[in-house]
Structures are given as structure tokens and as C-alpha cells.
Image (cartoon, grey):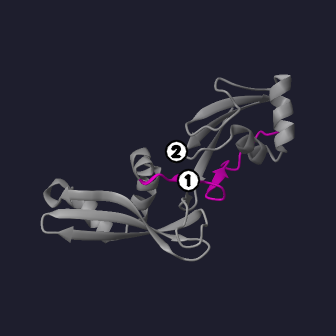
């Protein structure tokens, strides 16, 4: 029987960027946007607050764009401070590269095992689905899902009792499956 696990985001990740006021490197985005129009041109930023001093930083979303070239539904979402849009923009590699930021997903996701049954079987097949592109170490997911230590998971991989078509070292952001032999 195939068990399905889902990696689900629980909140927006921490934005890693140096604060100009206190030299901290962590900002929390709360889904607020600032939109500024000057004649026919529009700018939009996602606002984030420094976790140490509370200073605000602006992450560029739109820069000097013609208002007519921006989709009306995007403008509405910006004006409504849409939290879902903030999450989409933070996951967008173009936005991250333009703003020279990285994301820290620690404590911003959870593993939903769906109350997996049949954990006492000799061979357990698991399919892992990512609800969002969250970089997570497969060994950490497996350890959390089965209630094992990461060292125990590494031992199972080394012994060949934990196998997958994908490499289980490093971080993954896409769906994968694995088989555990007890």
C-alpha cells in the first residue's frame, strides 16, 4: 500500500537580507504591499520587517512599468495585500534574484502524513508531494514522518534499507518517493 505525505507551508519564510539599520540578516514579510503610481508608470514593493529592530525593507515587485501593461487582477491583489500573492512572489526566482534575497524555510512548513497506517509492515512505500517549492532535506522528512533520528535515517540509507529513485542527500523541492525495508 502506498502512503502519501504532503509538505505544506504554514507561513511565509524568513527573508534573508542585511538590515541597513541594525545589521541583522532576517526579515519577516507579512503580506503588505506598497504601490506607487506616477502618471502612467507604476512601482510596487512587498514590505518586510526586520526581526531585530522592526525596520522596513521594500522588495521590488514592479519597477517603472506602464500601468496598462499590468494585469488588472494583479493590481487588485496588490491593493488588497493578498497574502497568497506575497507567497507566490517570494517563491519566484526572478523576484529573489532581482532583490538579492534568499529564503529561510525553517519552521515555515509541516509534514502531513495523513495519519499513515501500515507503518508496522516489512516494506513501506511512501510518495512525498510538495504543496509549494520548499527546499527540505529528504532525510529530515523521513525522520520526522517515521519518528526516527536523522542519524538512524542516514544509517538506513547506507545499509540499503531506504531506497529512492532520487538522491536522498541534499535538498529537494519536488515530489519524490521512497521505499523503507525494515
The part of the chain drawn in magenta is: 99-120
Which quadrant would the C terminus be assigned to in this image? top right
Image quadrant assignment for residue 4: top right
Circle 2 sits in a helix, a strand or a loop, which is it? loop
- The numbered mark at residue 133 is 2
Left/right placement of residue 91 relative to residue 61 reads right
Q: Which residue matches tag 1?
A: 103
Say whether disc 1 or disc 2 marks the residue closer to the N-terminus.
1
Find the residue positioned furthest to the bottom.
54
User: Residue 140, percent across and down?
Assistant: 73, 44
- Graded by Cα atoms within 10 Å as few (under 14), some (14 to 19) or many (20 or more), the crowding at tag 1 reads some
Closest to the camera, between mark 1 and mark 2, is 1
User: Residue 46, percent across and down?
Assistant: 40, 64
Tell me the residue at 67%/27% (across/down): 167
Asked if residue 105 lies in the magenta stretch, the reply is yes
User: Residue 126, percent across and down?
Assistant: 68, 35
- Graded by Cα atoms within 10 Å as few (under 14), some (14 to 19) or many (20 or more), the crowding at tag 2 reads some
Tell me the residue at 68%/41% (across/down): 137
The residues tagged by marks 1 and 2 sit, at their Cα atoms, a distance apart of 12 Å
Q: Is residue 165 above or below residue 6?
A: above
Circle 1 sits in a helix, a strand or a loop, which is it? strand
Amino acid at each position: 500500500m502506498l502512503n502519501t505525505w504532503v509538505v505544506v507551508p504554514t507561513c511565509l519564510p524568513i527573508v534573508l537580507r542585511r538590515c541597513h539599520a541594525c545589521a541583522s540578516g532576517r526579515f519577516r514579510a507579512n503580506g503588505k504591499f506598497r504601490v506607487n503610481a506616477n502618471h502612467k508608470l507604476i512601482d510596487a514593493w512587498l514590505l518586510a520587517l526586520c526581526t531585530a529592530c522592526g525596520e522596513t525593507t521594500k522588495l521590488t515587485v514592479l519597477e517603472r512599468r506602464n500601468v496598462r501593461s499590468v494585469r488588472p487582477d494583479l493590481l487588485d491583489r496588490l491593493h488588497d495585500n493578498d497574502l497568497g500573492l506575497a507567497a507566490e512572489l517570494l517563491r519566484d526566482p526572478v523576484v529573489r534574484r532581482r532583490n538579492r534575497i534568499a529564503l529561510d524555510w525553517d519552521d515555515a512548513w509541516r509534514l502531513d502524513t495523513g495519519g499513515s497506517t501500515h507503518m508496522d509492515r516489512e516494506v513501506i512505500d511512501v510518495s512525498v508531494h510538495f504543496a509549494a517549492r520548499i527546499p527540505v532535506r529528504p532525510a529530515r522528512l523521513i525522520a520526522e514522518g517515521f519518528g526516527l533520528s536523522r542519524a538512524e535515517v542516514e544509517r538506513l540509507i547506507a545499509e540499503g534499507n531506504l531506497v529512492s529513485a532520487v538522491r536522498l542527500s541534499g535538498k529537494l523541492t519536488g515530489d519524490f518517493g521512497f521505499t523503507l525495508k525494515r
